[in-house]
Amino acid sequence: MLSVTNLRKNYGDLHAVSDVSFEVRRGEIVGLLGPNGAGKTTTVSMILGVLAPSAGTIRVEGHDVMRDHRKAMERANFAAVYAPLPGNLTIEQNLRIFGMLYGVRDLQKRIEELIAEFDLEKYRGKKSGVLSSGEQTRLCLAKAMLNRPQLLLLDEPTASLDPSVARDIRAKIRGFVDTQKCGVLWTSHNMYEVSEVCDRVLFLSHGKVLLEGDPKTLHIKHGKSSLEELFITVAKEPLTLDLS
């Protein structure tokens, strides 16, 4: 679904992302992990075509994001807590406008499906700007699934949710992946969540992929008691890790 090859982003002498390469396969959820400033959001922004890479290639189902952005993005969608939908529009208006932008067929039917799936029926006429953080998150995820994307980019999708709602959202995303056979790139600082939902994880440090593996066993390979302890080591003492 996604192929990233030798990706770089430089700001003068600062290398925000440096020679990053990875793939996300069909039916797979890949966690993109790392401390603040590691390059996660910069990488996601380049995949979306919001930032132009300094070097490297990004392909979504074989379509080069920079050369054929429209076709690549027809197959993708995105949700993040820092990218709320227009607050002066109602839930239904937001879904309708974004559905039209994505050219969704049978749009009203799809809107009704998503409003029901994300339990938004009683809020459909409310402006999204007055919704709670959890309700806004559900709306953003509903928007992200409008076009049944083959690649779903989720940047901290459950960061503002209470544990029970976050659990439900993870289950919905897992179900979507299993039924639609799409690929997901998921950033998070919640290591419990990552262990529960991700099939594979990539740890970024200073713009480079430092570690990769199964979130349930990667910490053991590196002599740590948990994925959270491994995350802390990557954030504070990456040079102490045995990368052989």
Image (tube, rainbow, N blue to C red):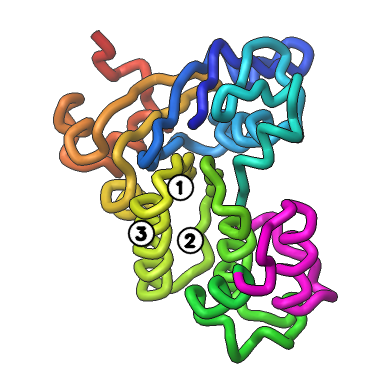
Of residues 19 and 227, the one nearer the viewer is: 19
Say few, some or many: other residues with alpha carbon within 10 Å of mark 2 (under 14 / 14 to 19 / 20 or more). many
Task: Judge whether residue 83 is colored magenta.
Answer: yes
The answer to which quarter of the image holds residue 100 is: bottom right
Residue 175 is marked as 3
> Above or below — where is 201 with respect to 83?
above
User: Toward the viewer: 213 or 104?
Assistant: 104
The mark nearer the N terminus, 3 or 1, is 3
User: Residue 219's spot in the image, x, y percent?
Assistant: 21, 33
Decide whether residue 168 is among the magenta residues.
no
For mark 3, give the secondary structure.
Answer: helix
Please state which of residues 98 and 185 is positioned toward the viewer in this rendering: 98
Do labels 2 and 1 touch, CB within 8 Å? yes
Q: Residue at x 55, y 21 (%)?
A: 207
Q: Secondary structure at mark 1?
A: loop
Q: Pointers 3 and 1 in contact (CB under 8 A)?
A: no
Residue range highlighted in magenta: 80-109
Pointer 2 residue = 158
Q: Position of residue 54 (x, y in %)?
A: 72, 13
Q: Secondary structure at mark 2?
A: loop
Which dot, 3 or 2, sits closer to the camera? 3
Q: Nearer the viewer, mark 3 or mark 1?
A: 3
Can residue 115 be seen here?
yes
Which of marks 2 and 3 precedes in the sequence? 2
Give the residue type at disc 1: Ser
Which percent across, then down, holds residue 90? 76, 79
Q: Is residue 209 above or below residue 164?
A: above
Q: Is residue 167 above or below residue 24?
A: below
Quadrant (top left, top right, bottom left, bottom right) of the C terminus? top left
- Location of residue 14 by image quarter: top right
Residue that carries the numbered disc 1 in the rendered image = 188
